[in-house]
């Protein structure tokens, strides 16, 4: 499974039941695109409905709480996420780190809880433009990961995907060069090898995210060590998201 590109749509705070038709359309077409693993992360309110609509694609959440239950008004536990039909959860997205003050330690505790609840995890990392310009991006991202990776990798191995999302590329239409993406993904791979050994590190797919669109998807997805894409804006309509899925399938053609 790890060899197929993994294309995940993060709907962020977008979507009401009117958008279920987009999920359905994505699912129907994804059934013909077996070379690609496709998933959607709608808002909590739509997880169950999307889960019931689709047959082929994965459904996940965009966050969960680190605790099992209790007096946490407005929060959703990992077990609740799993109970809603989700199979994975995106954790450590820069919008949660920046807008909700999520630290690496909190992200790590959420990952531990998600894995305990049987969910797969997409762990996000990425640097600001200032850090990129200072030349310290790879160091910064590797430190961020070291502090947020699950406490017990043996439990998480098959459950873990990493998404590199430079903050300055999210929703801006700007992307790093292919060389910069390859260099960052290789640095992340080396970190995983140094922490877990080559065999286990090879189980972890590293996605790229940040202004991925049908027009640039094939180039970005062809880069070394890029195992797929985490897509925001362009995942909101079936037409543009499927354009990315098709580009991913094309990278698999012999
Ligand atoms: O943050 C992202 C996905 O998690 C990327 O968002 P955009 O694709 O809209 O740049």
Image (tube, helix red, strand yellow):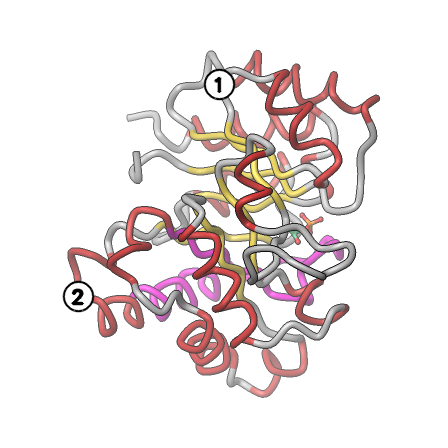
**In the image shown, does 178 or 41 lie closer to the viewer?**
41
Mark 1 is surrounded, within 10 Å at the Cα level, by few (under 14), some (14 to 19) or many (20 or more) other residues, namely many
The residue that appears at 63% across and 16% down in the rendered structure is: 53
* Screen quadrant of the N terminus: top left
Q: Please say if 252 is above or below 29.
A: below
Q: Residue furthest bottom?
A: 134
* SS at badge 1: loop
Q: Please say if 39 is above or below 183.
A: above
Q: Is residue 43 magenta?
A: no
**In the image shown, does 98 or 100 lie closer to the viewer?**
100
Q: Is residue 182 magenta?
A: yes
Query: Label for residue 219?
Result: none
Residue 247 spot, x, y in % from top left: 51, 30
The residue that appears at 49% across and 36% down in the rendered structure is: 87
* Screen quadrant of the C terminus: top left
* SS at badge 2: loop
Q: Please say if 140 is above or below 55.
A: below
In the displayed structure image, the side of residue 171 where residue 182 appears, left or right: left
**In the image shown, does 156 or 36 lie closer to the viewer?**
156
In the displayed structure image, the side of residue 122 where residue 234 appears, left or right: right
Residue identifier under label 1: 56
Mark 2 is surrounded, within 10 Å at the Cα level, by few (under 14), some (14 to 19) or many (20 or more) other residues, namely few
The residue that appears at 73% across and 53% down in the rendered structure is: 173
Residue 33 spot, x, y in % from top left: 45, 18
Is mark 2 in CB contact (under 8 Å) with mark 1? no
Residue 120 spot, x, y in % from top left: 43, 45
Q: CA distance from mark 2 to mark 1?
A: 33 Å
Residue 45, picture quadrant: top right
Query: Label for residue 197?
Result: 2
Instruction: Indicate which disc, 2 or 1, sits on the residue closer to the N terminus.
Output: 1
Q: Please say if 90 is above or below 35.
A: below
Q: What residue span does the magenta drawing correspond to? A: 160-189
């Amino acid at each position: 499974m790890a060899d197929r590109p993994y294309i995940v749509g993060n709907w962020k705070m977008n979507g009401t039941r009117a958008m279920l038709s987009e999920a359905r359309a994505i699912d129907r077409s994804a059934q013909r695109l077996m070379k690609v693993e496709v998933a959607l992360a709608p808002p909590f309110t739509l997880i169950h409905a999307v889960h019931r609509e689709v047959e082929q694609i994965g459904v996940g959440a965009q966050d969960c709480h680190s605790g099992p239950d209790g007096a946490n008004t407005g929060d959703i536990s990992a077990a609740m996420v799993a109970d809603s039909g989700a199979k994975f959860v995106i954790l450590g997205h820069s919008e949660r780190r920046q807008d909700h003050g999520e630290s690496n330690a909190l992200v790590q505790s959420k990952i531990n809880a998600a894995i305990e609840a049987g969910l797969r995890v997409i762990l996000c990392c990425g640097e600001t433009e200032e850090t990129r310009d200072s030349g310290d991006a790879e160091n910064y991202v590797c430190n961020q990961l070291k502090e947020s990776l699950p406490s017990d990798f043996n439990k998480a191995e098959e459950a873990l995907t990493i998404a590199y999302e430079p903050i300055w590329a999210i929703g801006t239409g700007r992307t790093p060069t292919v060389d910069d993406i390859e260099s960052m993904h290789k640095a992340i791979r080396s970190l995983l090898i140094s922490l877990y050994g080559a065999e286990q590190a090879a189980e972890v797919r590293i996605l790229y995210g940040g202004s991925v669109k049908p027009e640039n998807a094939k180039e970005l997805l062809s880069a070394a060590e890029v195992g797929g894409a985490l897509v925001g804006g362009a995942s909101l309509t079936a037409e543009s998201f499927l354009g990315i899925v098709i580009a991913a399938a094309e990278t698999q053609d012999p």
